[in-house]
Amino acid sequence: MKLTASFLRRLACVAGVAFIPTASAESGASPAFSPGAIFEDLEADGYGLFSGKLQSLLMHRDIEGAGHGNSGTLAATLNYRSPEWGGLFVGGQGIYSWRVFEDGDRRAGGPAYWLSNDEFSVLNEAYAGFNFESVGWEGAELRVGRQILNYDFAPTYNIRQKDQSYEGVVLKTQPRDNLTLDLGWFDRFSSWASREGGPSTWRAEFIDVEDRVGVPYDTNGFFFASAVYTPCDAFSLGAYDFYGDDLFNVFGLKGAYTWELGGDCGSLTFRGHWANQRDVGRMNRDGLGDIGSNVIEAGLDYALGGLTLSGGGVFIRGDDFQTPFRTSFTIDTELLWYTMQFEGGTNSGYLKGVWKWEDWMFYAMYVASEHRCGRVCQEIDVVVKRTFDAGLYTAVKAGYGGRRPGTLTAGPKTNALDLRWFFGWTF
């Protein structure tokens, strides 16, 4: 595995574009052109809240047997939230990602195709809402349209140039000070990736959820409820249910308890999670067949100052656990997803460390998954991030996956390398 010369030559191209607003950043002064100044005037005049981001992503991936690919993209994101008019408001998020360069075959299965960094333009959020506080119902808000969610089964999952997004209706409520209850429905989905063409549905464009799940018939989407009870700072308990019409139902329970060790000894947090998944309606007959799966997760975190050390296990019992809206539960997002930890009969363990020091963040995670056939798949990911003045930041992410065969029961073992460099400016 090696970095190609063409990839290295093009680093300067995208990096140079990304550094345009940083001319005076080293001195702590604002960039020569600052949209923030324009937004401040608009916000002061009552036109709503504006924010944005400019981010470059350089990526190299090399998988044995599939070849290597390189890409460079530059994305601009603009967010808006209107003032409220009697409780009514609107909001949105527009993203344009420009493919500056790309090496490799972009046909389905080619090295550039599975990089998933193609050019795209999408209205990632476009919603109308109502704040019920205006009619005396505090803590309640309704949104209709495209929106970014963050639930166990429908997470944000921002690992490249965009968040996952969903199109539907969500009602957030707070029946008590220590209890939240969210109800919702969605039937369309926009992925974190941006592939063009081919059979993959990991695309930025919005598609019907049944196409993402992979069934040949129409459905009425997913209905969900999610509740979190926090009686004190040390303890939380959550429950959720995601019902996919003619797809599958996922019911989950999770809890966390933090024990303060006292003095300067830090704290321990115990975490547990159980989820059950079952096929619904036509899924068994016309879709993916019988689905019966359970996920059992347990984790322990030790925190002291800016250091957190974590470890735990994830166990899949029964069939493959379906995750059409990419999620990781206890195990963090992997760069390569080389461990395939949601396959039926898989036992996974992980170790993770995070250290935050001044403007730096250092992160490392190791995951090993033993599959039903006896094969063991592994991945290690490392992240180093630095933030600067004037909203600037940079991050390097590296992942190495080892010992995954072409299929779990046969085929040679393969290794893979993933390298990413982010440079961004938020305003």
Image (spheres, rainbow, N blue to C red):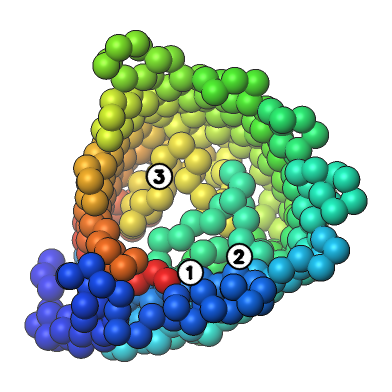
- Observer-nearest of 204 and 229: 229
The three-letter code of the residue at mark 1 reads Lys
Quarter holding residue 128 = bottom right
Measured as percent of width and height from the top left, residue 362 is found at 22, 46
Cα distance between the residues tagged 1 and 2: 9 Å
Q: What residue sits right under mark 2 in the picture?
A: 165
Q: What residue sits right under mark 1 in the picture?
A: 162
Of pointers 2 and 3, the one earlier in the residue sequence: 2
Label disc, if present, on residue 332 of the rendered structure = 3
Q: Residue at 30% across / 53% down in the picture?
A: 405
Q: Circles 1 and 2: CB distance less than 8 Å?
A: yes
In the displayed structure, 176 sits above or below 149; it is: above
The three-letter code of the residue at mark 3 reads Asp
Q: Is residue 245 left or right of residue 325?
A: right
Q: Residue at 75% across / 47% down in the picture?
A: 172
Res 288 visible: yes
Measured as percent of width and height from the top left, residue 308 is found at 30, 32
- Observer-nearest of 54 and 162: 54
